[in-house]
């Protein structure tokens, strides 16, 4: 790729200017270098802050995991308790049904006895 003559002259002027400043003891790139150092330091601070946040997040995540485990264990215990209570309720319902049938038999017997006694009169 061949560059235009104007561009070559411009590049040569810049080169000579930079060379002259360097020979005079001035670093023409010092300002840009300082700017980059400042940006690097800010970036390093941000990375450090992000690392701190990351480690805090890991700690919090671990604590949340422990709490979730506790809640899961508790939920399993609660499910067992609920099933236990349901079983007991079914047993009590069955007992009540048996007692109800027994009472109905007794009532039927008493009714028959009362009818017999009434019919004797």
Image (cartoon, rainbow, N blue to C red):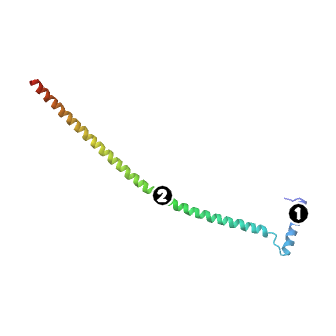
- Which one is in front, 49 or 20? 49
- In the image, what residue occupies the spot 28% across and 40% down? 93
The residue lying at 88 percent from left, 63 percent from top is 10
**Mark number, residue 10:** 1
Dot 2: within a 10 Å radius of its alpha carbon, few (fewer than 14), some, or many (20 or more) residues? few
Give how far across and how far down residue 104 sits, in percent: 21, 33
Q: Is residue 43 left or right of residue 10?
A: left
Q: Is residue 63 above or below residue 30?
A: above
Residue at 51 percent across and 59 percent down: it is 61
Does residue 118 appear to the left or right of 17 in the view shown?
A: left
Q: Which residue is mark 2?
A: 65
Quadrant for the C terminus, please: top left
Q: Is residue 48 left or right of residue 74?
A: right
Q: In which quadrant of the rendered view does residue 24 lie? A: bottom right
Real-space Cα distance between discs 2 and 1? Answer: 65 Å
Local secondary structure at mark 2: helix
Q: Residue at x 40, y 52 (%)?
A: 75
Which part of the image, by quadrant, shows the N terminus?
Answer: bottom right
Mark 1 closeness class: few <14, some 14–19, many ≥20 residues within 10 Å: few
Residue 14 image-quadrant placement: bottom right
Q: Is residue 41 above or below residue 86?
A: below
Residue 97's tag is none
Q: Is residue 19 above or below residue 100?
A: below
Label 1 sits on a secondary structure element that is: helix
Place of residue 39 in the rendered image (x, y in percent of width and height, measured from the top left): 71, 65
Task: Work out whether residue 21 or residue 57 is closer to the camera in this orientation and state it.
Answer: 57
- Compare marks 2 and 1 and give the one earlier in the sequence: 1
């Amino acid at each position: 790729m061949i560059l235009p003559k104007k561009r070559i002259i411009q590049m040569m002027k810049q080169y000579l200017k930079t060379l002259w400043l360097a020979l005079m003891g001035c670093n023409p790139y010092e300002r840009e270098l300082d700017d980059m150092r400042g940006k690097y330091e800010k970036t390093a601070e941000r990375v450090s802050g992000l690392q701190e946040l990351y480690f805090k997040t890991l700690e919090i995540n671990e604590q949340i995991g422990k709490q979730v485990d506790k809640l899961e264990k508790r939920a399993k215990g609660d499910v067992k308790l609920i099933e236990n209570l349901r079983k007991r309720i079914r047993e009590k319902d069955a007992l009540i049904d048996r007692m109800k049938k027994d009472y109905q038999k007794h009532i039927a017997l008493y009714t028959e006895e009362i009818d017999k006694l009434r019919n004797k009169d």
